[in-house]
């Protein structure tokens, strides 16, 4: 049986990661399909500017099955870097194999090993599957309210 590999994104992953991210945006979140050049630029930007964030992928037999994106910021209160888990996605045909859980652990281990203050993330109020995963992993709902504006 082939082994699952969890690693950071490499240049060779860009075409396949683009398709996974498109599934995440369009199929899962029902948002308009982004321009291919813009999404590829985002992937490359994160790769070329590791101080801004990083992406992990789950790979099996040379195929990408999921990804997680961490973006980096700072915590003034703790005077340390902080991470935002902005994306955690597993392709439909790869679900049920604990890939999301392992990607989450990869992110958590990264921030702990690198002295980050914390990792935050958001999920939709009706995304009960994600909430179940985050609760299982030891996450807790923050006391802070999230606001946004466009």
Image (spheres, grey):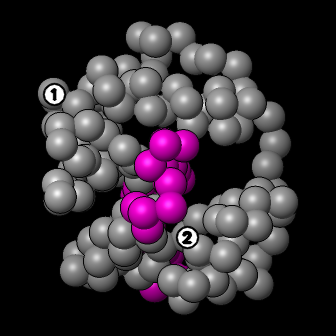
Taking depth in this image into account, of 99 and 145 the one nearest to the observer is: 99
Q: Is residue 148 left or right of residue 99?
A: right
Q: Please name whichever residue, 52 or 94, is drawn nearer the observer in this view of the structure.
A: 94
Q: Please say if 145 is above or below 79.
A: above
At a point 70% along the width and 19% down the height, the residue shown is 32
Q: Vertically, is 13 above or below 104?
A: above
Residue 50 seen in the current view: no
**10 Å crowding of disc 2: few (<14), some (14-19), many (20+):** some
Give x and y (percent) for residue 39: 45, 22
What is the magenta range? Answer: 70-99
Q: What's the residue at 65%, 27% (across, down)?
A: 26
Name the residue located 71 percent from the left edge and 81 percent from the top edge. Answer: 141
In the image, 86 versus 24, the foreground residue is 24
90 relative position to 14: left or right: right
Q: Which residue is mark 2?
A: 120
Q: Closer to the camera: disc 1 or disc 2?
A: 1
Residue that badge 1 annotates = 12
Q: Position of residue 74 (x, y in %)?
A: 44, 67
Q: Return the residue nearer the eye: 2 or 48.
A: 2
Vertical relation: 33 (above or below) 99: above
The answer to whether residue 108 is magenta is no
Q: Which residue sits at x=84%, y=60%?
A: 126
Residue 127 position in % (x across, y down): 75, 60
| Mark 1 or mark 2: whose residue is earlier in sequence | 1
- Residue 82 at x, y = what percent? 43, 70
Q: Is residue 41 left or right of residue 125?
A: left
């Amino acid at each position: 049986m082939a082994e699952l590999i969890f690693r950071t994104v490499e240049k060779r992953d860009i075409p396949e990661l683009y398709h996974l991210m498109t599934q995440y945006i369009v199929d899962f979140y029902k948002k308009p399909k982004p321009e291919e050049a813009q999404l590829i630029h985002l992937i490359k930007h994160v790769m070329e500017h590791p101080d801004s964030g990083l992406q992990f992928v789950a790979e099996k037999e040379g195929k990408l099955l999921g990804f997680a994106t961490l973006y980096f910021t700072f915590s003034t209160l703790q005077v340390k870097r902080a991470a935002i888990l902005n994306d955690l996605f597993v392709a439909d045909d790869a679900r049920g194999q604990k890939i999301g859980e392992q990607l989450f652990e990869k992110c958590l281990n990264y921030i702990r090993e690198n002295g980050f203050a914390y990792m935050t993330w958001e999920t939709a109020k009706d995304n009960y599957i994600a909430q179940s995963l985050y609760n299982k992993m030891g996450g807790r709902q923050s006391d802070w309210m999230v606001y946004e504006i466009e």
